[in-house]
Image (cartoon, helix red, strand yellow):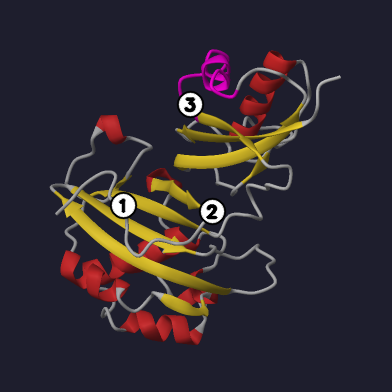
Amino acid sequence: MSCMRNIAITLCFDGRRYHGWQCQQNAMTVQQRLEEAIESLTSERVRLTACSRTDAGVHANMFVCNFRTRCTIPTQKLPFALNAKLDGDISVLQAREANAAFNSRFDCVGKEYVYRILNRTFRDPFLCGRAWHYPYGLDIWAMRRAADFIPGRRDFSAFMAQGSSVKTTVRDVKYIEVKKDGDMVDIYVCADGFLYNMVRIITGTLVWAGRGKIAPEYVGDIISAGKRELAGPTAPPDGLYLNRVFYDKLPEKAEISFCED
């Protein structure tokens, strides 16, 4: 009998037609499709452990999960075999043999998200569902100034949506960078962990600052007050991407994958 292996997979996906990552009874999810592909390939029913959960409509440029199997397929062939069984909106990029103790969720030390805003009068049909179309003018300097008040280890309950039960609302935000290239505004946020809808609420708050609805320095007061109602609106899921996942240490700055100034 072959020995049990712990396989770690790196993938990316377009979340537009999925109801998030995690399996659900009455909706298609990324986890369900990937587990079905693995079962079809190995004849084993597996349960994937994931680095994160993503909401409906949210995307991933990098997503890590792992599963245990007795299949003997070499790891270098697994991405080819799995991609042949998956739709085009999910792509397995890499598979590797992990040590028995590796857990893609609990070994993860932090993540970087990027939120994409198409900031022009008219929509782009090729970015529909992949960026937030925001047709009103934004002051990028004000957004960057507002973002300066966010990094650090503090209570971010003001940036958490209702319906979440967590032991602590304290998170360590390593950096926030607001990048603009033509009509695209990309907001990069890196932290050791995130609260429910945290990046989307941060984005809505920075957009408020960019619209002049709040002064940039007011963001510090919002965090100190810890009240969700003081922060900006929750940005739609369309523009949110899990961009990078870290298992060693958090970086000092964003790795720009879409644009530069």
Residue beneath the point at 65% across and 38% down: 66
Give whichever of 36, 198 is nearer the camera: 36
118 relative position to 21: left or right: left
Name the residue tied to disc 3: 91
- Measure the alpha-carbon separation of dots 1 and 2: 16 Å
Q: Quadrant of residue 254?
A: bottom left
Q: Which residues are magenta?
A: 75-93
Q: Position of residue 25 (x, y in %)?
A: 74, 34
Q: Position of residue 78 (x, y in %)?
A: 58, 21
Label 3 or label 2, whichever lies nearer to me, is: 2
Give whichever of 79, 135 is nearer the camera: 79
| Residue 139 appears anywhere in the view | no
Name the residue tied to disc 1: 255
Above or below residue 31? Residue 121 is: below
Tag 2: residue type?
Answer: Tyr
Q: Are marks 1 and 2 in contact (CB under 8 Å)?
A: no
Name the residue tied to disc 2: 247
Tag 3: residue type?
Answer: Ser
Q: Quadrant of the N terminus?
A: top right
Above or below residue 179? Residue 217 is: below
Residue beneath the point at 36% across and 38% down: 130
